[in-house]
Image (cartoon, rainbow, N blue to C red):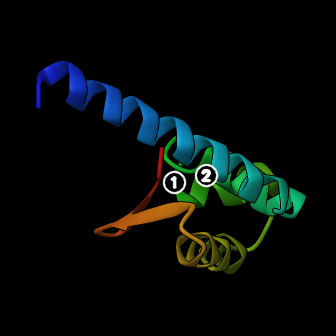
Amino acid sequence: MTNNDIKRIREMMEFLTKRELSKELKKLKPTEKKIYDLTGIKGQTEIVKILNIAPNTVSNAWKKLEKEGILIKEGQKYKKVV
């Protein structure tokens, strides 16, 4: 397998992941979508202030999105799959 083959496989996997992710994001409630959008850019405290929501709302949303495969937990932080 060449480097070009590996690159092509990676590109296709990313494309398929984004396509499936897009379907899942459409199912989210508006607040969950906003939390998702801010994840990786802002911390929980900032998200709480920006969206004027309770900290447990963010925490619960992150747990739900992780369970659904939309977010990945790395240490104490969450990040987007793609």
Pick whichever, 29 or 44, lies toward us: 29
Neighbor class of circle 2 (other Cα within 10 Å; few <14, some 14-19, many 20+) is few
Foreground residue among 79 and 17: 17
| Residue depicted at 47% across the width and 52% down the height | 81
Contact, mark 1 vs mark 2 (Cβ under 8 Å): yes
Q: Is residue 10 left or right of residue 39?
A: left
Q: Quadrant of residue 73?
A: bottom left
Q: Which mark is residue 46?
A: 2
Please state which amino acid type lies under the numbered disc 2. Answer: Glu
User: Which residue position holds label 1?
Assistant: 43
Residue depicted at 22% across the width and 31% down the height: 6
- Image position of 64 with respect to 71: above or below: below
| 67 vs 11: above or below | below
User: Quarter holding the N terminus?
Assistant: top left
Q: Residues within 10 Å of mark 1 (few under 14, many from 20)?
A: few
Task: Name the residue at 59% across, 42% down.
Answer: 18
Residue 59: x percent and y percent? 60, 75
| Residue sitting farthest toward the right | 30
> Does 65 appear above or below 26?
below
What label sits on residue 78 in the rendered view? none
Which corner quadrant of the image does residue 55 belong to? bottom right
Q: Label 1, label 2: how many angstroms apart (C-alpha)?
A: 5 Å
Secondary element under disc 2, as helix, strand or loop, is helix
Name the residue: 84% across, 62% down.
Answer: 27
Q: Secondary structure at mark 1?
A: loop
Q: Which kind of residue does numbered mark 1 sit on? A: Gly
